[in-house]
Amino acid sequence: MKPIQEYTKQEKLEAILEYNPCRVERNAVLRYLLAVRRDNTEQIAYFESFGDSVHNIILNVRTYERGTLFGYTAKQFDEYGWIRGMLPIVERIELDILNTIHIGQSIDGTYAVTVGWSTGGAGGGSHPSVWDEPIRDYKTAVKQGIAELEQRYAYAMAHSSDGTNYNASKIRKLMTKLKEVKQWYLEPKQLSLFEFA
C-alpha cells in the first residue's frame, strides 16, 4: 500500500472520510480534512509528517500535541513509526508488589501520576503518560496518588461482601500501609538539632 503522501487530493479525501474516528479524535481528523480540502500545503505537510496512513497520522498528532503540555517539542518515533507518550518513572511508592504509586516526570519537570492496585481478584493500573493530568509540583503529585489509592480502597471496602474481588483483610492492611506512606511523605518531620548517643 502506498503512503498517503503519494495519494491524489481525491484519494486523500476519501481515505480521511473512510476513517472512523472516536470522539476524541474528531477534531484532529477535521483539521486534516479541512487542510486537504483547502489545499493548505503547510497544514497538510504538518499532518503528513506524522505517518503514512490516516490512522497513524491522527494518533501521532494527538500524542504529539498532548505532549506539548509536558514540554515535549521533538517528534520522537519508535521503530514502528509511533510517538509514545510514556513518561519516565522517577519514583515508585510501593505498598506491596501490586499496589504502587507511579510518579513520572517529563523533560520540563512536569509530573504525571498513576497507580497500580489490587484488592484480591480486582485491580488495575497504568504507566504515567502525557494522557494523565499535568502536575507542576512533586508533593501535589504524591497527594494525588495517595488520594487515588484511598478512593480505590474505600470503594473496595464498601463492596467487600464480594470476597473474591475485594478481600477485606487485604484492604485493611493496604489502608494501614497507605496511612504510613501518607505520614512519611506528607506530614512535616520533626528535625533535631542534636544527636544523642
Image (cartoon, rainbow, N blue to C red):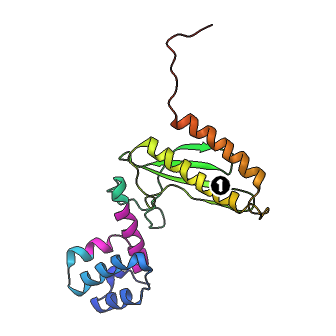
Q: Which residue is mark 1?
A: 153
Start-end of magenta stretch: 45-66
Tell me the quarter of the image containing the N terminus.
bottom left
Q: Residue at x 34, y 64 (%)?
A: 65
Q: How many marks?
A: 1
Q: Closest to the observer: 197 or 57?
A: 197
Instruction: Judge from the rendering whether residue 191 lies leftward or rightward of residue 173; answer left or right.
Output: left
Q: Residue at x 37, y 89 (%)?
A: 17
In the displayed structure, 119 sits above or below 107; it is below
In the displayed structure, 13 sits above or below 135; it is below
The residue type indicated by label 1 comes to Tyr
Instruction: Judge from the rendering whether residue 7 lies leftward or rightward of residue 24; answer left or right.
Output: left
Tell me if residue 89 can be seen: no
In the displayed structure, 33 sits above or below 143; it is below
x then y, percent, for residue 116: 61, 54
Instruction: List the single residue furthest toward the front.
Output: 158
For label 1, count other residues whose C-alpha is less than 10 Å away and answer few (under 14), some (14-19) or many (20+): many
x then y, percent, for residue 174: 69, 47
Residue 197 painted magenta: no
Tell me if residue 129 can be seen: yes
x then y, percent, for residue 160: 74, 60
Residue 56 painted magenta: yes
| Residue 16: quadrant of the picture | bottom left
Q: Residue at x 26, y 83 (%)?
A: 34
Tell me the quarter of the image containing the C terminus.
top right
Instruction: List the single residue furthest toward the top.
Output: 197
Q: Which secondary structure dominates the residues rendered in magenta?
A: helix
At numbered mark 1, what does the secondary structure look like: helix, strand or loop?
helix
Q: Closest to the observer: 34 or 42?
A: 34
| Residue 20: quadrant of the picture | bottom left
